[in-house]
Amino acid sequence: MNRILLIFTLCSLMVSCSTKNNNNNNGDNNGNNNGDNSNETFTEIEEPIPTPPTIDVAASRHEKKFFKELFKDCNSSGDKRQLVEACNYSNSTVRNKAVSIAGQNPGSYNLGQICDIFDHCYNNWKYVNDPDGDEIYEYASNTISNGLNGDCDDFAILVSSMVLSIGGEARINFAYGPNGGHAFTEVNIGTTVVEEYISKRYKSVYDNSGIWTRTDKEGNNWLNLDWFAKHPGGNYFDYTHGTTFYIMQQYCNDFTK
């Protein structure tokens, strides 16, 4: 009797263990796998922004063949002397503001500093017209003091002045086309390769159309810093002709597309 009971007990235990193992296996195959699938996430690896390239370029030179070129106003694009005066890049307000922004990418003058300046102005700008019938070229220092308010030429003056204040070279263009007139800044980047940095830094708005620049007779590439472009090197305003003002050289010339 005791022997029969012992055998029955052992068989019961074996059946119980087998059932438990099957349940555990089912749980591993079903519950745990389902749990893994439901909690599994695919995280996009953020591609790091490259180190901004150093801008190593000598300032462009412009031969003034006649004494009158020192004072010419260049076509009908406004008074060159007023524009040059408004770009008061050595003013302490302009210099201090530019340096504090460019310090986000410290070191020698580099593309990151240019982009930081553009981003600050672009993201904080509020458009306000000049008085009707009166074109005002506002001093860069005043535009900083008024909280970055003004029109397109005020924006161009401010960006140019900040770039100039940290050792770069910038120029201002007054361009005209089917949609009227517009002012925008370009910065001299020489032959520096900039597409990799810009495309990765601005990947949310970069449209893969390439980096938009214009090249001068000396082989320097000038990077578009227009607010219409949305990022440094974006596409140009639709123009047919215009005037370029070189602030440091106090020189200007006309151009066509």
Image (cartoon, rainbow, N blue to C red):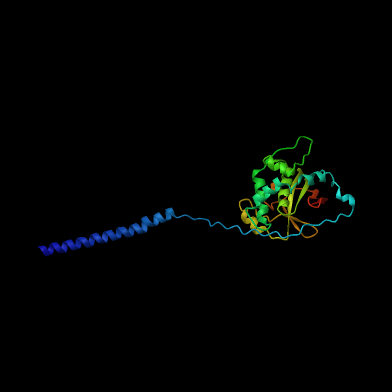
Residue 141 lies in quadrant: top right
Q: Is residue 60 above or below residue 80?
A: below
Direction left: furthest residue: 1
Residue 144 lies in quadrant: top right
Residue 147 lies in quadrant: top right
Quadrant assignment for the N terminus: bottom left
Q: Is residue 77 visible?
A: no
Direction front: furthest residue: 92
Q: Is residue 202 left or right of residue 142?
A: left
Q: Is residue 92 visible?
A: yes
* Residue toward you, 228 or 77: 77
* Residue toward you, 164 or 184: 164
Q: Is residue 7 above or below residue 153?
A: below
x and y, in percent, of residue 104 in the image: 62, 53
Q: Is residue 197 left or right of residue 256?
A: left
Identify the residue shown where x is 66% and y is 54%. 113
Identify the residue shown where x is 71% and y is 47%. 92
x and y, in percent, of residue 102 in the image: 65, 52
x and y, in percent, of residue 238 in the image: 75, 48
Identify the residue shown where x is 43% and y is 53%. 39
* Numbered-mark total: 0
x and y, in percent, of residue 116 in the image: 65, 51
